[in-house]
């Protein structure tokens, strides 16, 4: 979602911006690192500035080992490459539960 917001095609960016309008956006240092990695490697300063602007408007949350363990389980069970890294609901477990429901792997083990 984060990369799509910055580097996606025009329609994708517009849809994500509409969705996030008026919402408080949460993220993590992990999401920040993963999102910026390719732009840093390719020295794309203009893209890095866009990421920095986005992350400056986010509230950052701490990710615990329990959250990473749950994310690992969900990824293994659903065979996805990565979970959503930009967090807009109030708490990370809400995102994990939402993702689990979407992939029919719902668990209240958080």
Image (tube, helix red, strand yellow):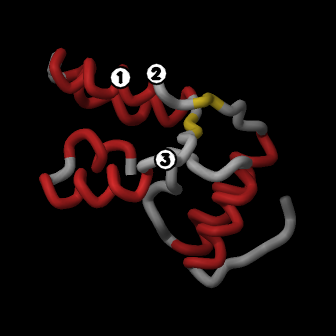
x 56%, y 78%: residue: 103
Residue 110 position within the rendered picture, expressed as x and y whole percent measured from the top left: 84, 59
Comparing labels 2 and 3, the label whose residue is closer to the camera: 3
- Residue that lies at the very extreme toward the bottom in this rendered image: 104
- Gap between marks 1 and 3 measured at Cα: 16 Å
Q: How many marks?
A: 3
Residue behind mark 2: 56
Work out whether mark 1 precedes mark 3 in sequence or the reverse, and give the earlier one. 3
Dots 2 and 3: beta carbons under 8 Å? no
Question: Looking at this view, is 78 or 48 the one in front?
Answer: 48
Disc 1, SS: helix
Give neighbour class at mark 2: few <14, some 14-19, many 20+ (Cα, 10 Å): few
Tell me if label 2 and label 1 are in contact, CB under 8 Å.
Answer: yes
Identified at 57% across, 47% down, the residue is 87
Cα separation, mark 2 vs mark 1, equals 5 Å
Q: Residue furthest right?
A: 109
Q: Is residue 60 depicted above or below 99 in this figure? A: above
What's the mark number on residue 22?
3
Q: Nearer the viewer, residue 95 or 67?
A: 95
- Check disc 3: other Cα within 10 Å, few if <14, some if 14-19, many if 20+: few
Q: Which residue is mark 1?
A: 53
The residue under the point 67% across, 78% down is: 105
Q: Residue at x 50, y 54 (%)?
A: 84
Label 1 Cα crowd, 10 Å radius (few <14 / some 14-19 / many 20+): few
Q: CA distance from mark 2 to mark 3?
A: 16 Å
Percent x, y for residue 96? 67, 60
**Vertical relation: 16 (above or below) 56:** below
Question: Going by the image, does 44 lie left or right of 93?
Answer: left
Q: Earlier in the sequence, mark 2 or mark 3?
A: 3
């Amino acid at each position: 979602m984060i990369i799509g917001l910055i580097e996606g095609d025009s329609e994708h960016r517009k849809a994500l911006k509409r969705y996030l309008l008026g919402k408080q956006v949460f993220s993590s240092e992990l999401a920040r690192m993963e999102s910026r990695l390719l732009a840093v490697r390719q020295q794309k300063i203009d893209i890095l500035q866009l990421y920095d602007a986005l992350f400056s408007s986010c509230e950052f949350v701490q990710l615990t080992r329990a959250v990473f363990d749950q994310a690992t389980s969900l990824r293994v069970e659903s065979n996805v490459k990565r979970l959503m890294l930009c967090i807009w609901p109030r708490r990370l477990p809400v995102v994990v539960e939402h993702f689990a429901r979407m992939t029919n792997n719902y668990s209240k083990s958080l």
